[in-house]
Amino acid sequence: MTDSLARMQIADGGSGNGEKWNSVDGDLAEVFDPLNFHQAAAQCTLRLWRYLDDSAVKGLDLVEPAVLMKAARELMTDERERVADFDEGRLGQIVDLYLNTGIQVHSPGYMGRQFSGVVPLAGLVDLVSSVANQPSSFYEAGQLPNVAERLMAEELNRLIGWDPAEFAMVTTSGGSLANLTALLAARNRAFPGIWARGVAEEGGRPAVAISEEAHYSVSRAAGVLGIGEEQIVRLPVDGQGRIRPDGVVPVLDAAARRGLKVFCLVASSGTTSMGAFDPLDELAALTRPRGIWLHVDGAHGASLLVSERHRDRLRGLAEADSLTWDAHKMLFVPAPCTLLFYRDGDAARGAFQQRASYVFDEEPDVYSDFDSGDKNLECTKRPMIMPLWTLWSVYGPALFARKIDHLCAMTGQAHRMLRAEPDFTVLHEPEANILCFRYDPAGLDRTALHRLQLAIRNRVRADGRFFISKVDLDGVAALRVVLMNHRIGAEHLAMLITEIRTTGQRVLRENAARDDQKDGDQR
Amino acid sequence: MTDSLARMQIADGGSGNGEKWNSVDGDLAEVFDPLNFHQAAAQCTLRLWRYLDDSAVKGLDLVEPAVLMKAARELMTDERERVADFDEGRLGQIVDLYLNTGIQVHSPGYMGRQFSGVVPLAGLVDLVSSVANQPSSFYEAGQLPNVAERLMAEELNRLIGWDPAEFAMVTTSGGSLANLTALLAARNRAFPGIWARGVAEEGGRPAVAISEEAHYSVSRAAGVLGIGEEQIVRLPVDGQGRIRPDGVVPVLDAAARRGLKVFCLVASSGTTSMGAFDPLDELAALTRPRGIWLHVDGAHGASLLVSERHRDRLRGLAEADSLTWDAHKMLFVPAPCTLLFYRDGDAARGAFQQRASYVFDEEPDVYSDFDSGDKNLECTKRPMIMPLWTLWSVYGPALFARKIDHLCAMTGQAHRMLRAEPDFTVLHEPEANILCFRYDPAGLDRTALHRLQLAIRNRVRADGRFFISKVDLDGVAALRVVLMNHRIGAEHLAMLITEIRTTGQRVLRENAARDDQKDGDQR
């Protein structure tokens, strides 16, 4: 009877707009048609094939935003009243414009940032993720992603060395959010009343100890969490950018005298500027007896754990409390894929507190035990583990180790090559795949040296053969390369050196000519 | 001379491990080979074609985590020493397992959550994004994504109605993070000293006003930001779950008497439980004169703006200060794609404060003007706008309007059908595409009614034909459908009603039999 009643209502269209629902099928059926999808897929993958097949040395084709706005706007259909017919040409133009205007992460000319030239298979897994759309904060919505998180956590924790029965891992949307979450867990452990009562009512003056070289997301987190940036205590670093353990105790003692309660010390493995690795073992020996949470921001460098040759950089990690690890950096998967590890799984549950009957189950069961919604900020979370777990499953860990070893070796090569150049200054021994240096011909003062590096960086970027970055070290700009692409060989480093020298000399000549002109004008 | 020096060093291998770098090419070249990519792409897209082509009514194939762990573990290569050869079969099994164990967002049996059955073309754009890997917090790294954000912001702001010269929009990783960011911007505007000095030193007692129906991420944000959940002031709601404007002033006055400074009122458009739309116009009339920031959590319902038929639900939005809008809900793109709008662009820059020479330029230029890294938490950010902008460009806004209209109409149909069933209770008039109801045969007390809904929900899920959710309303569980798939027709609603009734009666019979058994045992 119920069924026939329902059918009757369908037949007469309920409130009278039944026909509308049926007519909607035409347009939408086209858009969702599997064959149309397959044809568009062929078009996109062919373009990606060509893109991956291009081994030209190129940097960035930097376009004026206003020009690009105009080009992009012209690719937008004018049709507003009905669903526009699929236009294969328009899609092709969009994909071409997208590929051509980006950083060329697969070219040997790309040496500028910590984003990966991703393993292409990872992109295909992302395609599946996007079409299947299984958000992964809750087991029932994305079963395999939740299981894959456990499996990857086990694999990687073997390299970290925490108790398999005690540790926990969550995925989250980027290293900044992971650092924030770890600091939150640490804050809530040290000040259990803050969550409910707030920083003002809880009393005490929560503080965080970091070095000047910590990523900006860490000091930002102090601002976000209501602790206040003024409650950040700065630890001294050595010439390589590493926290000096002998400088830690005086700083902590001085903080205590000011009435601050340092609940967390953040170490970097390695730093963003120079890729420096803080001495975790010595730091843990100082934080443990004081009950201070040791968080390791390994966004960039935790991946070195996968390499037998390089994992010693993180010696002492087993004594830390939490670790941020960006797989979208040196595990070569699409961004973001950040893993946040806790030595003590209970701490992971301390970061957040909530109840919401529409997602959290009243009676926990074997399924909800796999949920992570109570341990990460996101409610809807991309199944970001899937590309990583798939690569690990298909190729094994050696894929990552090989590429990391190559990148670090090539960075060592860059160091040796630059050191041999009389008109370059290398600013540190590279510990991983980041190297900072200056084009430094004789006779420049600090200001001139600073401005020269900025000019070189922007000119090299504008010339479009190489893409490198810059960073301020001791108040003077430096050039910075991050080698993320295994296609980079010594020949490309040699080309870059030549390009920087040529560019630098051109800038100096132009400056001299301008000064002459000015002098002339003043006479 | 430099070049020849470099070549010399390449030839002798520098530190002696030069051969290693060359030999690495073999393995890695296979993994990155464009032709191999293209073949794997063909395999994946064929599977997705079949997946999209399957119109069977199905819910969830819920697998015990331990069983799935075992199956997944068996798909992982044992090879650890060298890069394993690509195994097409293994990839196929992984994709199949992934597709089969997820929520079936493209099936008419999926009615459980706010995740979309995405427009398939959006997945292809994500494929391009993942391979090209252009993080989009900085213009230079992802030029088109940054431009596309501006274009989409302009398009959507026409529907919001803010001053085009004043408003701002950022993309961020999910609605929870967007709500957090908006509250942070509001906090920092009302308490400009908190960022540097912290909540404790700044003085005053910051507080937030929300209804009981607000998403859990909002009250969570109060815990995160150091305000404290106890400083949340609760606004009364009507029977439909909407904030009652006549209840707001007494609550705000009472808060002021307790010494609280309410700096933000959060309204929902619509709520997660029932899809209720708070009366923005009336709320804005109350918050504006008091200098209280009105944030609208439109994660679910802001998309109704695209529909002429339904946009009136957000009447008054033009008077609000900020808006969270999840495009991964009712704009049908892969998660996450959250847009956070501010009426006043300066407020957007107030959420965070930082300096970091490796990413932020010393001298802002036309390029850095497009950067969003200073306005969103993420440093590395997925170019999440690209699927949305591409769909909008290729199909136009009518695609979204058509699908939204259909989903809302079909939810109205569900409401009429359920109201006509004597053994069901419908709990509200649907305002969008969410509907809550109970299977409610005569004679059950509150506790029995509650347990019956939970049992039905879990049984229906386990039976695997339909996937619906549950929510507690007035302390008693209710069944909840969210219609996100345009393939759902009235016939599927009728099937669901029958399934729920059959399941409910089975549960009641089993309970009765168990009670008889117990009575018998006690005799």
Image (spheres, coloured by chain):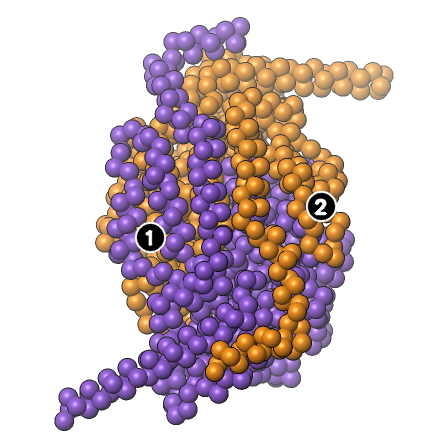
Chain colours: A purple, B orange
- Estimate the x, y position of residue B397 in percent, counting from the top left: 32, 35
Q: Quadrant of the C terminus of chain A?
A: bottom left
The answer to whether B132 appears left or right of A87 in the picture is: right
Q: Residue at x 64, y 62 (%)?
A: B24
* Residue A356 visible in this rendered orientation of the protein: no
Q: Amino acid at mark 2?
A: Met
Badge nearest the viewer, 1 or 2: 2
**Residue A67, quarter of the rendered image:** bottom left
Count of number-bearing discs: 2
Q: Residue at x 46, y 19 (%)?
A: B489
Considering only vertical position in the picture, is B33 above or below B309? below
Q: Which residue is mark 2?
A: B76
Which chain is disc 1 placed on? B
Q: Residues within 10 Å of mark 2 (few under 14, many from 20)?
A: some
Q: CA distance from mark 1 to mark 2?
A: 40 Å
The answer to whether B258 appears left or right of A156 in the picture is: left
Q: Check residue B343 in the rendering and tell me which mark sits there, or answer none.
A: none
Q: Residue at x 42, y 43 (%)?
A: B387
- Estimate the x, y position of residue B71 in percent, counting from the top left: 73, 38
- Estimate the x, y position of residue B380 in percent, counting from the top left: 48, 58
The answer to whether A397 appears left or right of B267 in the picture is: right
Q: Secondary structure at mark 1?
A: helix
Q: Residue at x 68, y 40 (%)?
A: B90
- Estimate the x, y position of residue A311 in percent, counting from the top left: 69, 67
Q: Which residue is mark 1?
A: B147
Considering only vertical position in the picture, is B69 above or below A5? below
Of pointers 1 and 2, the one earlier in the residue sequence: 2
Q: Residues within 10 Å of mark 1 (few under 14, many from 20)?
A: many
Residue nearest the observer in this picture, A180 or B330: B330
